[in-house]
C-alpha cells in the first residue's frame, strides 16, 4: 500500500484543514474532538465506523424536509447540540467515496460560519486500507451547548439567477460532473439511474473538471498543490483571482471541488451552486451548451 505524502509537505494554502489517520487515531479519546461520518451509502455507518464517530445523514440531518433548502439556524443548533458539539469542539468529517459527502457536510457547516472544522484526508477508505479499527457501537455523548448564528449563504453559495448573470458576464464556471453528463449524454453518473433533469448538457462556458481528479487513487488522499494547479490552472485555465462557480447535479460533488479550490489552493472567491443541474436542466429557457 502506498504511503501518502505528509499533508504539511504538499504545499497547500491551508494545510491545517486536513488531518491524517494518525492524527485521528491519536485523538480518539479527546473530548474536544467530534468525528462525524457522512456517507453516500446511508447504511454504511451501521456496518462499522471509526470508534467514537457519530453518523451525519446528508438527507435527513442537513436538509429542510419540506422546502429544498438547508436547515434553519434553530434546527442546525439542535442538530449540533445532539452531536455533543460545543464552542471549543473540533469537528472532523470523513466518509465514503473519497470524502465526497464529508466535504458537502463541511460546506453546509460553513454556511453557518462554523470555524473549527477539519476533514480526514483519505476518508473512510484510507482508514480501512490501513487496517485501523471499525466498531458498530454507537457512542452516547452529552448534549452540546454550541450557539449557532444566522446562516450566511452569500459568500460560498450561489443561486440560479446569480449563475445566469455570472454566465452573461463571462466569468468562470467549473462543471465537476462526469464527461458523459457534461456532454449531455447522461443526466446522472454512468453507474447511476439516468434521472434528475429533463435536459442534458452543461451551463455555457463551463470547464469540465471531474471532482475525482483531485484525489490520488492509490492513497485516496488529496493530490499535492502542484498537481492540483497543473489540472485547474495549467490545463483548464482557471485563475486564482477569478470569481468561480462550481456545480454538479445537486451540489454535493461540487462541494468537494469547492473545498479543494478554497482550502487547498487558497482561491478567495469560489461559490457552490447547489441547485446545480437538477435545477438548471429542469428550468424553462435556461441556456444549455452541448459539445
Image (cartoon, rainbow, N blue to C red):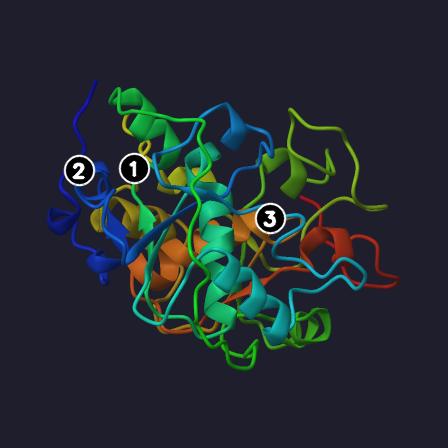
In the image, 284: left or right of 242? right
Residue underneath mark 1:
221
Q: Which mark is residue 262?
A: none
Q: Residues within 10 Å of mark 1 (few under 14, many from 20)?
A: many
> Spatial distance from mark 1 to mark 2, Cα to Cα?
13 Å
User: Is residue 210 visible from the viewing direction of this image?
Assistant: no
Residue at figure coordinates x 16%, y 41% from the top left: 26
Q: Position of residue 95 (x, y in %)?
A: 44, 38
**Which one is earlier in the sequence, the residue at label 2 or at label 3?**
2
> Spatial distance from mark 2 to mark 3, Cα to Cα?
26 Å
Q: Residues within 10 Å of mark 3 (few under 14, many from 20)?
A: some
In the image, 202: left or right of 76? right
Helix or strand or loop: what does disc 2 sit on? helix
Residue underneath mark 2:
22
Q: Position of residue 259 (x, y in %)?
A: 40, 57
> Spatial distance from mark 1 to mark 3, Cα to Cα?
22 Å
Residue underneath mark 3:
58
Task: Say which of 15 and 160 sits in front.
Answer: 15
**Which one is earlier in the sequence, the residue at label 1 or at label 3?**
3
Q: Tell me whether circle 1 and circle 3 mark residues in contact (CB < 8 Å).
A: no
Residue 172, above or below 185: below
**Which one is earlier in the sequence, the residue at label 1 or at label 2?**
2
Residue at figure coordinates x 13%, y 41% from the top left: 6
Amino acid at each position: 500500500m502506498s504511503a501518502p505524502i505528509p499533508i504539511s509537505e504538499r504545499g497547500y494554502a491551508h494545510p491545517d484543514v486536513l488531518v491524517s489517520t494518525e492524527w485521528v487515531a491519536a485523538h480518539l479519546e479527546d473530548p474536544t474532538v467530534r468525528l462525524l461520518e457522512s456517507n453516500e451509502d446511508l447504511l454504511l455507518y451501521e456496518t462499522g465506523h471509526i470508534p467514537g464517530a457519530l453518523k451525519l445523514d446528508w438527507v435527513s440531518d442537513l436538509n429542510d424536509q419540506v422546502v429544498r433548502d438547508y436547515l434553519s439556524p434553530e434546527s442546525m443548533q439542535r442538530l449540533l447540540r445532539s452531536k455533543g458539539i460545543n464552542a471549543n469542539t473540533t469537528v472532523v468529517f470523513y466518509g465514503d467515496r473519497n470524502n465526497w459527502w464529508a466535504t458537502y457536510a463541511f460546506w453546509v457547516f460553513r454556511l453557518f460560519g462554523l470555524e473549527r472544522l477539519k476533514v480526514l484526508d483519505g476518508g473512510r477508505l484510507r482508514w480501512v486500507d490501513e487496517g485501523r479499527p471499525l466498531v458498530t457501537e454507537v457512542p452516547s455523548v452529552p448534549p452540546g451547548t454550541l450557539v449557532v448564528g444566522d446562516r450566511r449563504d452569500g459568500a460560498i453559495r450561489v443561486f440560479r439567477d446569480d449563475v445566469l448573470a455570472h454566465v452573461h458576464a463571462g466569468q468562470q464556471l467549473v462543471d465537476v460532473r462526469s464527461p458523459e453528463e457534461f456532454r449531455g449524454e447522461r443526466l446522472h453518473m454512468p453507474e447511476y439511474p439516468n434521472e434528475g433533469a429533463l435536459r442534458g448538457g452543461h451551463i455555457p462556458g463551463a470547464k469540465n473538471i471531474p471532482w475525482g481528479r483531485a484525489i490520488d487513487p492509490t492513497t485516496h488522499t488529496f493530490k499535492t498543490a502542484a498537481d492540483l494547479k497543473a489540472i485547474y490552472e495549467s490545463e483548464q485555465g482557471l485563475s486564482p483571482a477569478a470569481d468561480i462557480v462550481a456545480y454538479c447535479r445537486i451540489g454535493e460533488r461540487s462541494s468537494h471541488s469547492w473545498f479543494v479550490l478554497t482550502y487547498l489552493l487558497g482561491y478567495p472567491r469560489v461559490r457552490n451552486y447547489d441547485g446545480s443541474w437538477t435545477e438548471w436542466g429542469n428550468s424553462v429557457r435556461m441556456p444549455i451548451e452541448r459539445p
